[in-house]
Image (cartoon, rainbow, N blue to C red):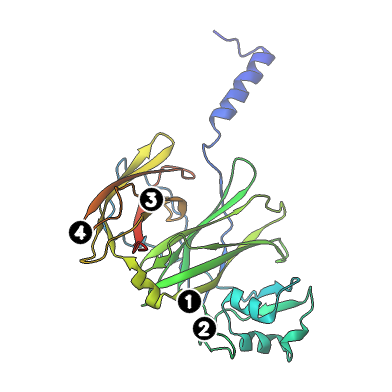
């Protein structure tokens, strides 16, 4: 038996106890992000975690996680700004943020767009309601549509990075594509320190559906105090959606597998005529507060393209943050294979 009265033995014992208490994954960061979006965003509160279910069975079309009515944050009027870099033009900046050239000129009082200066700070008019065709362009300048961002959480990584996970929910009546969000970290005075952009994991987000996103800051500033999430762009898919085959996910099960989470199911090509190419499956996990704790996408293994009405099984393992997930969501997409 160890004598804990001996100082050396007691130190070793306390050190081992501290190691045992360390979490397996990154620690969740509590500051709630400010969301800049054309629509009101509901944000989940933080009730006591519920006990996880060993095996989870989501519905084929997983419902949105319920959000408490008490958490409707006020959207701050913090403007989105851009510092002009070498080689950029006013037109390229307008296209990057999904705003019209005329609106960008008007809000910044620019009479001649050719007289931009490197280092000049521009205010980006996020949230326009109309899309105008810019003379000389082949296509209209895209304008962000009124969809929402929810379930955002920040996690420390084992190597000192900061991972932001969240979810885009399509609250419009249209199928969305090219959905881009930006996360900016601010210090205690509100000054922007660093930002990162990410597209939604899903190429298409049908009406009422959702898609996760991830932004990793490998070297986050030590002085960051609050995050801001900005919707940069999102376009109606229109004819692009015709290049995709309807895929249904059935017989879905999910359960913890050691330190990971395993999800299995069957994908089915619901088209009556079109063959499906590679089927991409995206799995998102959530904690008891409805926050995204992890996601992964993978390609279903099948012997060639999936014929109309054909099925194929899949199994996906993913790593998550914090406790075992209390819910998860699965989506699957596939394009018509090129001839």
Q: Do the CB atoms of the residues marked 3 and 1 lie less than 8 Å apart?
A: no
Q: CA distance from mark 2 to mark 3?
A: 33 Å
Closer to the chain start, of discs 2 and 4, is 2
Q: Do the CB atoms of the residues marked 2 and 1 lie less than 8 Å apart?
A: no
Q: CA distance from mark 2 to mark 4?
A: 37 Å
Residue depicted at x 74% and y 90%: 112
SS for tag 2? loop
Q: Circle 3 sits on which residue?
A: 299
Q: Do the CB atoms of the residues marked 1 and 4 lie less than 8 Å apart?
A: no
Q: Nearer the viewer, residue 104 or 127?
A: 104
Q: Circle 2 sits on which residue?
A: 139
Quarter of the view holding residue 170:
bottom left
Q: Position of residue 168 (x, y in %)?
A: 45, 65
Residue depicted at x 54% and y 28%: 20
Q: Circle 4 sits on which residue?
A: 309
Can I make out residue 251 in this image?
Answer: no
Vertical relation: 26 (above or below) 105: above
Q: Nearer the viewer, mark 1 or mark 4?
A: 4
**Quarter of the rendering occupied by the N terminus:** top right
Crowding around mark 3 (Cα neighbors within 10 Å: few <14, some 14 to 19, many 20+) is some
Residue depicted at x 47% and y 78%: 145
SS for tag 4? loop
Closer to the chain start, of discs 2 and 3, is 2
Can I make out residue 273 in this image?
Answer: yes
- Is 2 left or right of 206, judged from the image as shown? right
SS for tag 1? loop
Closer to the chain start, of discs 1 and 4, is 1
- Is 187 left or right of 149, judged from the image as shown? right
Residue depicted at x 39% and y 78%: 238
Determine which of the numbered discs, if any, sits on residue 39 in the image: 1
């Amino acid at each position: 038996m160890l004598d804990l009265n001996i100082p050396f033995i007691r130190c070793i014992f306390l050190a081992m106890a501290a190691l045992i208490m360390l979490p397996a994954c990154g620690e969740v960061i509590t500051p709630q992000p400010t969301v800049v979006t054309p629509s009101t965003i509901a944000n989940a509160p933080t009730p006591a975690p519920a006990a996880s279910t060993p095996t989870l069975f989501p519905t084929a079309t997983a419902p949105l996680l319920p959000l408490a009515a008490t958490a409707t944050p006020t959207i701050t009027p913090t403007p989105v700004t851009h510092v002009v870099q070498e080689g950029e033009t006013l037109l390229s900046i307008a296209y990057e943020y999904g705003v019209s050239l005329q609106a960008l000129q008007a809000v910044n009082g620019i009479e001649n767009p050719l007289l931009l200066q490197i280092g000049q700070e521009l205010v980006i008019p996020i949230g326009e309601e109309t899309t105008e065709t810019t003379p000389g362009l082949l296509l209209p300048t895209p304008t962000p549509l009124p969809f929402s961002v929810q379930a955002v959480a920040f996690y420390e990584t084992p190597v000192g990075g900061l991972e932001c996970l969240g979810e885009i929910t399509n609250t419009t009546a249209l199928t969305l594509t090219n959905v881009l969000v930006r996360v900016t970290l601010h210090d205690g005075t509100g000054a922007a320190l660093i930002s990162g952009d990410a597209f939604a994991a899903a190429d298409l987000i049908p009406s009422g559906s959702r898609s996760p996103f991830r932004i990793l800051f490998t070297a986050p500033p030590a002085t960051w105090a609050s995050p801001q999430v900005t919707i940069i762009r999102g376009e109606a898919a229109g004819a692009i959606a015709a290049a995709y085959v309807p895929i249904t996910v059935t017989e879905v099960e999910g359960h913890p597998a050691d330190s990971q989470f395993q999800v299995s199911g069957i994908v089915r090509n619901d088209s009556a005529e079109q063959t499906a190419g590679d089927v991409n499956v995206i799995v998102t996990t959530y904690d008891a507060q409805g926050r995204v704790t992890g996601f992964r996408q993978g390609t279903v293994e099948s012997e060639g393209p999936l014929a109309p009405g054909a099925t194929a099984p899949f199994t996906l393992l993913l790593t998550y943050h914090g406790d075992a997930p209390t819910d998860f969501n699965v989506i699957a997409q596939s394009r018509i294979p090129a001839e």
